[in-house]
Image (cartoon, rainbow, N blue to C red):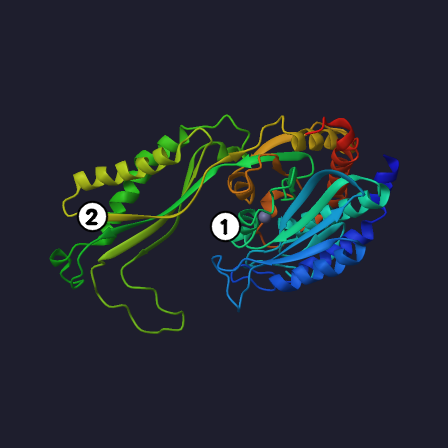
Amino acid sequence: MDALRHAVESRRDDLIRLTQELVRIPTLNPPGLNYREICDYLEGRLAPRGWACEFVRAHGAPGDSDTYPRWNLVARHKGPRPGECVHFNSHHDVVEVGHGWTRDPFGGELDEGRIYGRGTCDMKGGLAASIIAAEAFIATRPDYAGSIEISATADEESGGYGGVAYLAQQGAFAHVGHVIIPEPLHKDRICLGHRGVWWAEIETHGRIAHGSMPFLGDSAIRHMGAVLEEIETRLYPALMARRTAAPVIPEGARNSTLNINSIHGGQPEQPADFTGLPAPCVADRCRIVIDRRFLMEEELSEVKAEITTLLERVRAARPGFSYEIRDLFEVIPSMTEKSAPVVRSTAAAIERVLGIEAAYVVSPGTYDQKHIDRIGKLQNCIAYGPGILDLAHQPDEWVGVQDMLDSARVMALVLDDILMGQDPSLTRPPA
Ligand SMILES: [Zn+2]
């Protein structure tokens, strides 16, 4: 065990450099920049060390074009004996930089044990930790049984359709036994799954007229106001009363939640450099986009019916009220059993490395586990990786070097536990 620990810890400088170099490739999504570049970089790292690397472009996936091709990399290392396959999946895309940075977002600056930059925490630090863990394990246990895979995939931040979903549709998980997604859930926590999502656009209708004679028209904005009032006074209290038994973090996400992502009514907004005044019109259209996150205990059909019932209530109370509702996106909750093999291995490894019991959590938002579960039909999947979830998508995002090293040790121990067993051909009865 000391050999494995030493193999990880002696790679500290390598881990830092690897993380920095990944962060310096700005894989911004949208639109999906430098996906090929980061896959090439990873191939350059892994192929000379004995990994078979496969480039997969998600042809025809949302967002895929010749200008912004959706490239994924799957790297595979085989031990000399037959056995199971452990797969580490990291998304390589990062979200926009946003405002408020005091560090270079793509500099990968190292300062007092932290590496700063967009994607350090979510989740290039986790990707780097899994690579170091695998390399340290292979160097220490060259005779291991089975195989290790590392995938770097596109578009997790925009639904994963050009990434894990595409790979799963191609059968990339058919031979995989265990999946760890090194999302930043923290080094002592195992994330078993996530809540469900439903996005929808609601539009209210009105009739355009001159703004000086609004009584000749019908304001779609006032109709939407009535919808918002109903959401405020009846829906929010109902959601606050609904709590899951699952260990969702943070605490507030144990309730059902609803966010109104956007509202648009009347004339489109003009560019910032437009110096004219708006024209007086009654708004004939108003739209909101809702983001409803639901619990394992809720059914998607009930979640949708609750909104339709609300809209029908408004219709019954308001003359002239009409609306449309359009589904944009939906994901069923996903949850791996605590008794699943990858959960038990990871929990034991956390206890050995950190000397504390692993905590079990469920994520408020979804991540690529949904595709591995629904399309790949593999329920032996968790998110486990370094970094503090709250820092994801924030300015001055960072990941701690010690956290990366500790979680790399945990990942290496999981490999040791799963892949250093007996030759399965000796222990399993012949088929
Ligand atoms: Zn992420």
Classify 428 as above or below 393: above
Observer-nearest of 159 and 79: 79
Direction from residue 174 to residue 206 in the image, left or right: left
Q: Is mark 2 within 8 Å of ligand 1?
A: no
Observer-nearest of 421 and 223: 421
**At 74% from the left edge and 34% from the top edge, which residue is drawn?**
418
Quarter of the image holding residue 37? bottom right
Give the residue furthest to the front.
431
Are circles 2 and 1 on residues that touch, CB within 8 Å? Answer: no
Quarter of the image holding residue 428? top right
The three-letter code of the residue at mark 2 reads Ser
Classify 176 as above or below 55: above
The dot on residue 106 is: none
Residue 74, x across and y down, in percent: 66, 52
Q: In terms of sequence position, does the residue under pointer 2 or pointer 1 come before the other?
A: 1
Direction from residue 5 to residue 257 in the image, left or right: left
Residue 399, x across and y down, in percent: 69, 49
The three-letter code of the residue at mark 1 reads Gly
Question: Does residue 405 appear in this view?
Answer: yes
Residue hosting label 2:
322
Label 2, residues with CA under 10 Å away: few <14, some 14-19, many ≥20: some
Say what secondary structure mark 2 lies in. loop
Residue 259, x across and y down, in percent: 41, 44
Image quarter where the C terminus lies is top right
Which of labels 2 and 1 is toward the front?
Answer: 1
The dot on residue 159 is: 1
Observer-nearest of 214 and 321: 321
**At 36% from the left edge and 31% from the top edge, which residue is drawn?**
238
Label 1, residues with CA under 10 Å away: few <14, some 14-19, many ≥20: many
Quarter of the image holding residue 385? top right
Observer-nearest of 375 and 385: 375
